[in-house]
Image (spheres, rainbow, N blue to C red):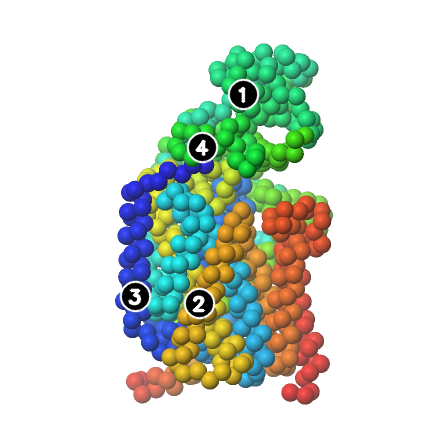
Amino acid sequence: MIYETSYKAIAIFFAFVAVTLGLSFYLGGKAKSSQGYFAAHGQIPWFVNGIAFAGDYLSAASFLGICGMIAFYGYDGFLYSIGYLAGWIVALFVVAEPMKRLGKFTFADALDAKFNSPGIKLAVGISTLAVSIFYLIPQMVGAGVLVQPLLGFSHWVGVVIVGATVIVIVVTAGMVSTTWVQFLKGSLLVLFSAILTFMIWARGFETKQGGVDGHVFQTIGPISESASDSALAETLAQQPGLEESEVVQPDGEWADVPYVRTRNGAGTVTVWRKEDAGDGMVRFSEAQTVETREGHVWVNGQPKGEKKGEPELHPVGYVSKLPGGETKTGPLGPFSFFSTLQNSEVVLWPKQVVTGADGVKTTVYYQKPTPGNQILRPGESPTFKGIRSDKLLDKLNFLSLMLALFCGTASLPHILIRYYTVKDESSARKSTIVGIASIGFFYVLTLYMGLGAMTSGSLDVTDSNMPAPLLARSLNEWLFAAISAIAFTTVLGTVSGLILASAGAVTHDLMSSYLKIEMSDHEKVRVAKLASVVVGVIAVVLGIQFKSLNVSYLVGWAFSVAASANLPSLVMILFWKGVTRQGVITAVLVGMISSLGWILLSADTFTGVYGLSADQAIVPFSQPGIVTIPLGFLTLVVVSLMTGGKK
Amino acid sequence: MDTRNSRIGLVLFAVYLLLYGGFVYLNAFAADVMETTPIAGVNLAILYGFGLIVAALVLALIYGLLCKPTVGEIAARGGKK
């Protein structure tokens, strides 16, 4: 879609970012020692730290990715919400207090408290870096997504802006300002999401035949299925705007798919999806297309425009039928919102890629009127459709992801370091409870926001990360500006936290503990800042590369790697006395390498990143957790038993 | 480690694990059950999902109320008490 620049939005946006940066500089001036830089002197009040947890955790993935997935496919996106929250239970009940007791700066400190081994520091330092960078990718992708509709920049500009801003924040400030910025962001994100949800309830549902641009999608027929192309062309020609239309002869894959292409008098090709209307009759519904011809993007049969009013994809997402044949519901409540949708019909827009005889690949987005009870049930998205299959292997992908989300939170380095910013174990506990309350509340809202976006008439069929900001814009321009600014600064905060975690790993675990480089306190901070810049640049590059993947999906991968590499050692050290140094090192490395390897060899990476077909993938399903998390535990136990005697 | 707090933690963890496990099991192996609408026309998938979020908060609060300061913390505060 073409995104118009909104000056109102830009003004709010920059005001917001300026306040954040100002705060960051002001607070950063107070933290000079490395204790201050990495752990905020352990002086952050627990309530502030708790909300900062929410700020860290409710990243681009939660706000953009989950809402987007719900808006595109329905309930399935909410499964991520549930898994992300459940992970906090592991963090609170199992990990929080020991982490606080054992460590000082980094996650490796805690794992290594008993052994004091440079090898552990090295292995855990590397895994911290790997997980942080993996987690950074979706944040960067999300940042680009936010900037696009707001400022009218292209995706990569957004990524670069975020990267640069964050590097400035981290280099000037450290953990004190990062925490306060997260506190601010976390509370505002939850507050504004609540406002958005109230507005969705107040708006209710209304039946439509198109999105907010006023385009009405046409349906032709029913006509007899046996009608010849000329009869079809004649019927088409009676429709407004389609006079002198002719049917394009199907070539290449077009011959095998249920579409008909027509070319009107002006030469514009429109694609229609053929549907069975019963009694030997068929109906044709208007589809939307995107294709690349000679380096230019074409939409709906015309070269894509650059300014408003020029050819672009039509926004979609609307209710086509309401219960009892109503056309408008008026305001709804938290439960009637679901029960009404349950008995309505919403038009979704799945896609299919068709290659013509000339080799041009056309992505066709077609209308799929879907009953509400299907939208609100699990298993409708491509990611989770396996749960509706009879084969166990197909279900494993889902089970694997739910396991990784459950185990992943408590293994994320940037979440774990937040336990060092409070003064004692009871503060660690209390701040986790505050975190769970605010994060849980937000996740309840994601379902309303996602479904609100699905029916807002503002969806861009090509981008599953955009629905939440576009929903806000369909409600109110100011709200859109505020939400985008908050979401953007939340990305900033999460990215700062991740970069700090990486910088800590490089400085403490790799340089100071493993390489035994003697550094003064001042030098440590300087090395950390340098490491921040390097990690930041890597994140920017990867963020541009992975643009097309749903951010929540990418985060799922980061969770898998974190859980596989870190959780086995973390849990076993707490509960088993027989753990050895070698066991920890091997388990961390095996968990990290196996989960990363699995992801790189999976069908989703083959199709989404390499552009190969899913059949060529080496591993049987895409989510590694169910194999690699137990593998990590097994490795730890076996190696510990083997090396137990010679500690 | 502090056995009392960690024991409470593990019991509550087990409770939540059962709830979460039940949810994942139903989704994977009895997806049709999730489509039923037991209360107010809202389906089980949504009710159970919201339930899990509320349960997490309730268990967290119970944990917060039951836990006592650890030995180390009491020692640290020693002078002030």
User: Label 2, on which residue?
Assistant: A532
Q: Amino acid at mark 4?
A: Gly
Residue type at mark 3: give it.
Phe
Whichever of callouts 4 and 2 sits on the residue coming sooner in the sequence is 4
* Point 41% across, 55% down: residue: A162
Label 1 crowd bin: few (<14), some (14–19), many (20+), radius 10 Å = few
- Residue carrying label 3: A25
Looking at the rendering, in which quadrant would you find the N terminus of chain A? top left
- Residue A28, horizontal then vertical, whole percent: 31, 69
Mark toward the start of the polypeptide (3 vs 1): 3
| Quarter of the picture holding the C terminus of chain A | bottom right
- Gap between marks 3 and 4 measured at Cα: 42 Å
- With A4 as the anchor, is A447 left or right in this view? right
Q: Amino acid at mark 2?
A: Ser
Residue displayed at 55% across by 24% down: A270
Q: CA distance from mark 2 to mark 3?
A: 17 Å
Q: Quadrant of residue A365?
A: top right
Q: CA distance from mark 3 to mark 1?
A: 58 Å
Give the chain of mark 4.
A
Which mark identifies residue A305? Answer: 4
Q: Earlier in the sequence, mark 3 or mark 4?
A: 3
Residue underneath mark 1: A267
**Percent of width and height locating residue A43:** 34, 74
Element carrying mark 3: helix
